[in-house]
């Protein structure tokens, strides 16, 4: 199929933010009384918005997840990202190539809050490629795995979702892309902080790739 637009997830696809965010979350959950290893925390929360997991957190800590706690979590997370976030290896070059090939018809469609997404794209040298085409699941009725953020991105670009390719690294994100009617490519490098290739394929990704530098050729 010839695609008309390319829609990117952010965390784990464009920016290597998961170890930072996950580390802050793990520490703060331990302060509430829920002790998890970094691997367990990643397995439970990868690809999910923390606020959407309030019920699970409350069940394990016996405490309500307050707005004040969420504000402190975001502050500590943002501080960590500001000092430590880096682009996924090869992402900047891949995005520039794809941006040129598709005449700017690309978007970043994330389940995270806008401040975090924009902070990360700015820090990683990706903002110029996505400015004005950034979509946050927090600003829509439903976040991933619902398709809302990808449908919003496709509509803003004026492209039928069925003519869009989505790039995702989590089962939650693949579900969102598939539900939107897009063709989903799964990114699953050997590092443990992405969902496994088999899981992405089982959820509906048409293909899985392991290096971001390979993406332009795959799409074209």
Image (cartoon, grey):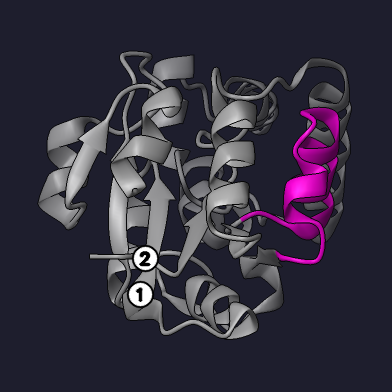
Q: Is residue 179 visible?
A: yes
Along the viewing direction, whichever of 129 and 140 lies nearer the viewer: 129
Label drawn at residue 3: 2
Secondary structure at badge 1 equals helix
Region rendered in magenta? 112-133
- Disc 2 to disc 1: CB gap under 8 Å: yes
Label drawn at residue 163: 1
Q: Residue at x 28, y 68 (%)?
A: 178
Q: Residues within 10 Å of mark 1 (few under 14, many from 20)?
A: some
Name which quarter of the figure residue 96 lies in.
top right
Q: Residue at x 34, y 20 (%)?
A: 189
**From the image, which quarter does the N terminus lie in?**
bottom left
Mark 2 or mark 1, which has the lower sequence index?
2
Name which quarter of the figure residue 149 lies in.
bottom right
Residue 7 location, x and y as percent? 51, 59
Residue 13 location, x and y as percent? 51, 37
């Amino acid at each position: 199929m010839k695609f008309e637009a390319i829609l990117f997830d952010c965390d784990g696809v464009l920016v290597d933010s998961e170890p930072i965010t996950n580390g802050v979350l793990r520490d703060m959950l331990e302060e509430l009384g829920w002790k998890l290893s970094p691997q367990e925390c990643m397995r439970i929360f990868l690809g999910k918005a923390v606020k959407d997991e309030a019920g699970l957190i409350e069940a394990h800590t016996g405490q309500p997840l307050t707005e004040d706690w969420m504000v402190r979590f975001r502050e500590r997370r943002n501080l960590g990202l500001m000092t430590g976030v880096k682009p996924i290896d090869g992402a900047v070059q891949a995005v520039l190539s794809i941006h040129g090939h598709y005449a700017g018809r690309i978007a970043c469609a994330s389940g995270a809050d806008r401040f975090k997404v924009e902070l990360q794209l700015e820090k990683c040298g990706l903002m110029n490629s996505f400015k004005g085409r950034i979509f946050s699941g927090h600003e829509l009725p439903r976040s991933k795995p619902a398709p809302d953020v990808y449908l919003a991105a496709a509509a803003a670009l004026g492209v039928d979702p069925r003519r869009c390719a989505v790039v995702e690294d989590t089962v939650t994100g693949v579900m969102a892309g598939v539900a939107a009617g897009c063709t989903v490519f799964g990114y699953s490098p050997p590092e443990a902080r992405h969902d496994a290739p088999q899981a992405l394929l089982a959820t509906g990704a048409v293909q899985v790739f392991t290096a971001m530098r390979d993406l332009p050729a795959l799409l074209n």
